[in-house]
Amino acid sequence: MAMLDGVQTLRDLEVSGRRCFIRVDFNCPLGEENGQIVVTDDTRIREALPTIRLAIEKGAKVILASHLGRPKPGKDNSKLSLEPVGAKLSEMLGVEVLLPDDCIGESAKRVVKDLRTGQLCLLENLRFHEGEEKDDETFARALSELCDVYVNDAFGAAHRAHASVHALARLTPERGAGLLMLKEIAALGKLIEGAERPYVAVLGGAKVSDKIDVLESLLERVDGLMIGGAMANTFLAAKGVDVAASKVEADKLPLARTIMDRARDKKVELLLPVDVVVASGIDATSGEIVDVAQIPAGTMALDIGPRTVELFTKKLNTAKTILWNGPLGLFEKEPFSKGTFGVARAIAATKAFSVIGGGDSAAAVHDAGEDVATKISHISTGGGASLELLEGKKLPGIEALRGAMRAS
């Protein structure tokens, strides 16, 4: 994998009896159950288990570190403690997980010092310190006091130059990638380095502006491009369709026309919705299926319609490689979930190598049913990171791992 040239892995590193600091992405959804805060989706924890188990098997003293949510400096952030994550991890691994009350300082040092071979601790939320998001070297040095060997397994945070992802890695001579990082790069790398044709992509989500770079990158690689979600409204409006009260990025209409022109010039088939599910607003409890040319005044498109699902499915059935990033409607609400779930099931039913680009589209696939999720070749744990990789950008969390000291 060219993207990992010069990068060691946990398999290469000597960690026996040493403090192995593993940056994981445990930014899990939380909810309340019987008055307690609990993890409501353990996907990211589950995906990190192979790396954690390997470190334990190799005799490491395992220190896990993650961010969770967006804590506000000076506010009560107790609801963003990693304590419920530690409890879920302990349950899944069947071992005790120690949790100091901070990620740096005396509490963390004391817990780490007392770790025995094969034991693990989970540091408290990294973002409780402003230095994390600022890639602050002083904060990174405080973390490095807990670390002999550094492993980055947090693909979902690899596109951020944050202290635990970037500065700390560069401060640690013995460093490498975890198994989840390798899995992500291997799968996404297939979409960049010679995907089997025909290669088709499905893009959804709210904004064209969020997907400009990936749209331009995909036009160089794919044979077909399907666009849904609120971003499709901007393309429809650019074609002169009256989308009524649907969300449109008016300042991106010229860009949408340019993308459609480029797709035509490159002979990339670009498909837009032919019917949609409309309602008076996002709080509506029901919707009406209409042709895109007949959206009633005062209503907005909140899902793709059944004829569009059929159109997209026909194209997906021709593919040998499929990428999907971004939901195709307001799938969190039952009246507007059928389009997104229908496309998820269509992708799962193909024999193509299929990749879901993390974020909301990953959540949508799981919501569509585990029988759907298990038939997808790869569901990424990193929405933003996967997009940036597909755009051809270098990820700070991977670049910081290059040129590390070789184990003797």
Image (tube, rainbow, N blue to C red):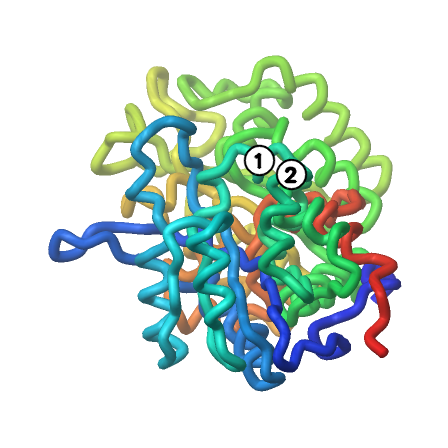
Q: Is residue 43 above or below residue 217?
A: below
Quadrant (top left, top right, bottom left, bottom right) of the N terminus = bottom right
Q: Which mark lies nearer to you, 2 or 1? A: 2
| Left or right side of 74 for 270 | right
Q: Residues within 10 Å of mark 2 (few under 14, many from 20)?
A: some
User: CA–CA distance between discs 2 and 1?
Assistant: 8 Å
Residue 3 placement: quadrant:
bottom right
Q: Is residue 363 visible?
A: no
Residue 20 placement: quadrant:
bottom right
Q: Mark 1 belongs to which amino acid?
A: Gly
Q: Name the residue that disc number 1 marks.
A: 131
Give the label on residue 228, or none.
none
The kind of secondary structure element at disc 2 is helix
The residue furthest top is 251
Q: Name the residue that disc number 2 marks.
A: 138
Q: Nearer the viewer, residue 367 or 142?
A: 142
Q: Nearer the viewer, residue 352 or 102?
A: 102
Q: Nearer the viewer, residue 242 or 230?
A: 230
Q: Is residue 255 above or below residue 106?
A: above
The kind of secondary structure element at disc 1 is helix
Q: Residues within 10 Å of mark 1 (few under 14, many from 20)?
A: some
| Left or right side of 394 for 93 | left
| Left or right side of 330 for 226 | right
Whether residues under marks 2 and 1 lie with C-beta atoms below 8 angstroms apart, the answer is: yes
Q: Mark 2 belongs to which amino acid?
A: Thr
> At x 73% / y 49%, what residue is drawn?
389
Q: Is residue 158 above or below residue 146?
A: above
> At x 72% / y 53%, what residue is drawn?
169
Q: Which of the marked residues, 2 or 1, is nearer the chain's N terminus?
A: 1
Residue 214 placement: quadrant:
top right
